[in-house]
Amino acid sequence: MAGTPEEDLLGWLEREEERLGFADIEDALGDIAKARDLFYDELGYDITDDQFQGLKDALVTRYEDFPTAGVKTTRDEHSWGYQTTYRIKGRFASFTQVQEAIRTPKE
């Protein structure tokens, strides 16, 4: 997970929220000890400080930055797995376009 792209972290966050519930994930990402317990209990993995910070940043991106920039996401199920799609003002957007939208100050 170290050096994991933000898009992948957002995908992980979405999958775990579906599996464990938003409240459990939000609670765990408020405290590194809780996050370590959650990761270890669910995945058998001991999260590092950098990974914890990356996931906290992904939480802020998804629930603060995306709505501010008008970004909507959907997670579509296909026969081969899931795909997250992004829309800005109703139009499909790449993750690069999404990153630009959340970095651009609103007037």
Image: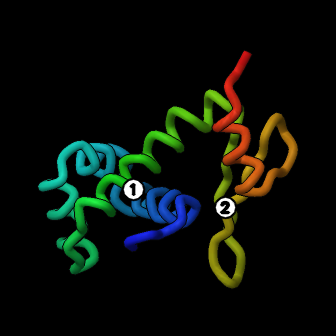
Q: Are marks 2 and 1 in contact (CB under 8 Å)?
A: no
Q: Quick one: SS at disc 2?
A: strand
Amino acid bearing label 2 = Thr
The structure's colour scheme is rainbow
Compared with 74, 9 (above or below) is below
Instruction: Give the residue number, with chain letter if any, for mark 1.
Output: 54
Few, some or many C-alpha atoms within 10 Å of disc 2 (few <14, some 14-19, many ≥20)? some
Could you say where residue 30 lies in the image, as x and y percent from the top left? 24, 43
Mark in front: 2 vs 1: 1
Residues at marks 2 and 1, CA–CA distance in whole angstroms: 19 Å
Instruction: Give the residue number, with chain letter if any, for mark 2.
Output: 84
Q: In the rendered image, which quarter is residue 17 located in?
A: bottom left
Q: Going by the picture, which residue comes out furthest to the bottom? A: 80
Few, some or many C-alpha atoms within 10 Å of disc 1 (few <14, some 14-19, many ≥20)? many
Q: Residue at x 24, y 66 (%)?
A: 48
Q: Residue at x 64, y 59 (%)?
A: 75
Q: Going by the picture, which residue comes out furthest to the top? A: 107
Could you say where residue 7 lies in the image, as x and y percent from the top left? 58, 61
Q: Quadrant of the C terminus?
A: top right
72 relative position to 23: left or right: right
Q: Residue at x 23, y 77 (%)?
A: 45
Amino acid bearing label 1 = Gly
Q: Residue at x 36, y 48 (%)?
A: 56
Could you say where residue 82 lies in the image, as x and y percent from the top left? 64, 71
44 relative position to 100: left or right: left
Q: Quick one: SS at disc 1?
A: helix
Compared with 32, 71 (above or below) is above
